[in-house]
Amino acid sequence: METDIDPRSLIGRKAFDSAGHKIGTVDEVYLDDATGVPEWAAVRTGLFSRDAFVPLEPSALVDNTLRVPFERSLIKDAPDFGVGRHLSPEQELQLYHHYGLELPPAAPPEHPAALSDRDAERDFGHVAGQDD
C-alpha cells in the first residue's frame, strides 16, 4: 500500500475482498507505533455492526476503494478486538498469523544494551567468566 497516503482519507471508503465482493466500509485506521505508517484498517462489515481488521499491506487503493487480497470469509473470521483502542503487540501478532503474513522486521533499539568487559567490571564488580 502507498505509505504516503493520509490515513484519514481511507475512512469511509468501501472495502472489497479478493473476489470483488464488498466487505464493508473503512471505519478506522491504525498506525504502526514505531513508524507512524498506516498498518491496519477496521472495516465495518455490517454483520452485527462488527469491525474486522484487515492489513493495509498488501492491500491497495483502486478506484477510490480499498482492495484487500483475502477472501471475505477469512476477513470476517479475523480476531475481534473492538475499535477505538490501541492494538497491543500480542493482538497485532494474532492478526499477522490469522492472515498468514510475515511479521515486519523489528525496529532496532534506540540505545544498544551491550556492555564492554571493562564496563561490566566497573558496573558489576567482576568480568563474566573470571573467578571471583
Image (spheres, grey):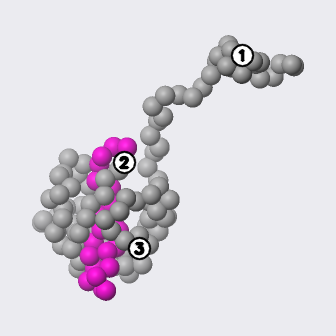
What is the CA distance from the residue labelled 2 to the residue labelled 1? 36 Å
Taking the magenta stretch, the answer to whether it contains residue 53 is yes
Rate crowding at label 3 as few (under 14), some (14 to 19) or many (20 or more) other CA atoms within 10 Å: some
The three-letter code of the residue at mark 3 reads Asp
Mark 1 element type: helix
The magenta region covers 33-54
Lateral position of residue 20 relative to residue 102, left or right: left
Query: What mark, if any, has residue 107 been given in the picture?
Result: none
Q: Which residue is mark 2?
A: 33
**Tags 2 and 1 touching, CB below 8 Å:** no
Q: Which residue is mark 3?
A: 80
Point 49% across, 28% down: residue: 111
Mark 1 vs mark 3: give the one in front.
1
Point 45% across, 45% down: residue: 105
**Residue 27, x across and y down, in percent:** 23, 69
Mark 3 element type: loop
Q: Which residue is mark 1?
A: 121
Pointer 2 or 3: first along the chain: 2
